Amino acid sequence: MQCRTKRHPNTNCHSQVLARYTAEQYRKWSETFGPVYQVQLGNTPVVIVNTAAAAKTLFLTQSAALNSRPLFYVFHKLVSKNVASIGTSPWNESCKNRRKVAATALNRQKVQSYEPVWLPLRLYCVMMVGLMYD
């Protein structure tokens, strides 16, 4: 495995990263490369974030850059070709709008307003299941 950073292109880091104190190795590298850097572990690029301030900046102000998900041929092209999933879709405006709609429909106040409809339906289902097994 190769460990690649902007200023550290070809260091073999497999033994350093998989050692017993991996977090300590990342902390040492942060002294050289800064609080946010990227390493290549096999075929997987990994972003290391070492400080709370860097995490806040990265995850709150740059969240759209980190929200994307990979496309999987079997799932996205064969199984759910026409399904608009929030949890598995790549990040784009459509996914962003679907998340907003879902968040609006599933907030605490809205969910509590569904209770008058849900309770009789639940009792009916319990009764029907009870009749099936009698």
Image (spheres, rainbow, N blue to C red):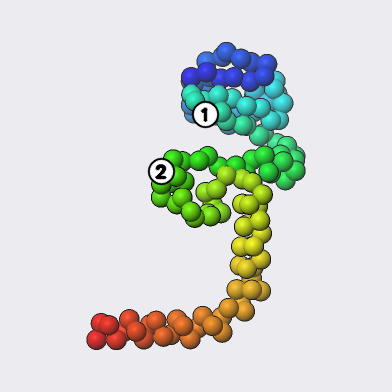
Q: Residues within 10 Å of mark 2 (few under 14, many from 20)?
A: few
Above or below for 32 versus 68:
above
Q: Which mark is residue 74?
A: 2
Q: In the current view of this chain or complex, which residue is farthest to the left?
A: 134
Q: Secondary structure at mark 1?
A: strand
Three-letter amino acid code of the residue under disc 1 = Thr
Q: Nearer the viewer, residue 92 or 47?
A: 92
Whichever of callouts 2 and 1 sits on the residue coming sooner in the sequence is: 1
Q: Nearer the viewer, residue 56 or 83?
A: 83
Q: Disc 1 designates what residue?
A: 44
Q: How many marks?
A: 2
On the picture, is 53 further left or further right than 107?
A: right
Spot occupied by residue 23 in the image (x, y as percentages of width and height): 58, 31
Spot occupied by residue 116 in the image (x, y as percentages of width and height): 56, 84
Three-letter amino acid code of the residue under disc 2 = Val
Name the residue rendered at 48%, 54% in the picture.
82
Above or below for 49 versus 40:
below
Asked if one can make out residue 7 in the rendered structure from this viewpoint, the answer is yes
Above or below for 57 versus 105:
above
Q: Which mark is residue 21?
A: none
